[in-house]
């Protein structure tokens, strides 16, 4: 199953590379929650759903654009983000991805894949291991860089400062614009810390990347220090997520946040 999902995400990325730069891709054709569906979002979603349909798998789908697509008698649920980082994609910024996460109906992860659209790099996992470009990835001992990927707004300045003040030593901050890829940068050692506390992330954004991280013993957490659970009943909001391979940093972060006055 992992190989199939990796294949579909890679083919979707190739399709989106071919479309890149064409006129009309940014036209808004619908809304979902506080977000909009653009032509390119729908094209990517349709491409993925058609490829899953070809496999004749009985899968219920949770996808960013359409929402919940129930299939009676289905054994699995696929949580799909057809285009994470659409603003980047539409503006020629080469940091955007395609994500598919497959779960059993009871919520246990089966397999998943994320593909970087412009580089073609893939991250995937099955029930036992994580893989980068199809090769087993066993994890990292220490991050290679001190890059912090931080997302917060004015209403969360206090919590953001609490997180950043827990970092010992110098660091650099970046805002790259694709939650799934940012999380994977962190879980493969190319960033030190990722956090998004804007109450804007959705389960479809990070379902696959979150499971990849767990396979290499990095557990995405909420601001309250709880493990992130992926809802399989529809597109839902994830209020906060904090990810780092440095467990001592996480302990300092959560200890500091608990000490903040209410």
Image (tube, rainbow, N blue to C red):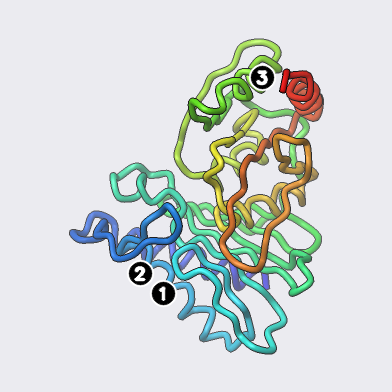
Total numbered labels:
3
Residue at point 78%, 32% (across, down): 141
Seen from the viewer's position, the closer of residues 89 and 130 is: 89
Say if 133 sits above or below 44 in the image: above
Q: Estimate how packed mark 1 is, as few (under 14), some (14 to 19) or many (20 or more) residues with alpha carbons within 10 Å.
A: some
Residue underneath mark 3: 162
Say if 71 sits above or below 135 in the image: below
Residue underneath mark 2: 43
Find residue 251 and report its horizontal and vertical position in percent: 81, 26
Find residue 255 and report its horizontal and vertical position in percent: 80, 23
Counting residues from the start of the chain, the first of labels 3 and 2 encountered is: 2
Quadrant assignment for the C terminus? top right
Q: Estimate how packed mark 3 is, as few (under 14), some (14 to 19) or many (20 or more) residues with alpha carbons within 10 Å.
A: many
Quadrant assignment for the N terminus? bottom right
Residue found at the very far top of the displayed protein:
169
Residue at point 54%, 69% (across, down): 7
Q: Estimate how packed mark 2 is, as few (under 14), some (14 to 19) or many (20 or more) residues with alpha carbons within 10 Å.
A: some
Task: Tell me how far mark 1 sits from mark 2, CA to CA.
Answer: 5 Å
Task: Tell me how far mark 3 sits from mark 1, CA to CA.
Answer: 42 Å
Residue 80 falls in which quadrant of the image?
bottom right
Task: Tell me how far mark 3 sits from mark 2, CA to CA.
Answer: 41 Å
Label 2, secondary structure: give it: helix
* Numbered tag placed on residue 46 in the rendering: 1
Which of discs 3 and 2 lies nearer the camera? The answer is: 3
């Amino acid at each position: 199953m992992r190989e199939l999902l990796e294949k579909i995400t890679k083919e979707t990325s190739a399709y989106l590379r071919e479309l890149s730069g064409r006129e009309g891709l940014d036209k808004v054709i619908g809304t979902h929650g506080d977000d909009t569906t653009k032509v390119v979002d729908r094209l990517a979603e349709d491409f993925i759903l058609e490829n899953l349909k070809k496999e004749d798998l009985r899968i219920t789908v949770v996808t960013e654009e359409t929402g919940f697509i129930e299939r009676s008698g289905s054994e699995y649920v696929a949580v799909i983000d057809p285009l994470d980082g659409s603003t980047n994609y539409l503006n020629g910024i080469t940091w955007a991805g395609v994500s598919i996460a497959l779960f059993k109906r009871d919520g246990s992860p089966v397999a998943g894949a994320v593909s970087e659209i412009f580089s073609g790099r893939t991250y995937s996992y099955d029930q036992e291991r994580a893989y980068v470009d199809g090769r087993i990835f066993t994890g990292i001992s220490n991050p290679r860089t001190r890059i912090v990927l931080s997302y917060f707004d004015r209403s969360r300045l206090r919590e953001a400062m609490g997180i950043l003040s827990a970092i010992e030593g110098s660091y650099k901050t970046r805002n790259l614009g694709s939650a799934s890829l940012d999380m994977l940068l962190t879980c493969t050692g190319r960033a030190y810390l990722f956090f998004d506390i804007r109450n804007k992330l959705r389960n479809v954004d990070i379902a696959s990347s979150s499971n990849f991280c767990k396979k290499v013993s990095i557990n995405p957490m909420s601001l309250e220090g709880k493990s992130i659970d992926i809802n399989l009943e529809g597109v839902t909001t994830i209020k906060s997520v904090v990810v780092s391979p440095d467990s001592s940093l996480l302990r300092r972060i959560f200890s500091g946040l608990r000490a903040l006055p209410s």
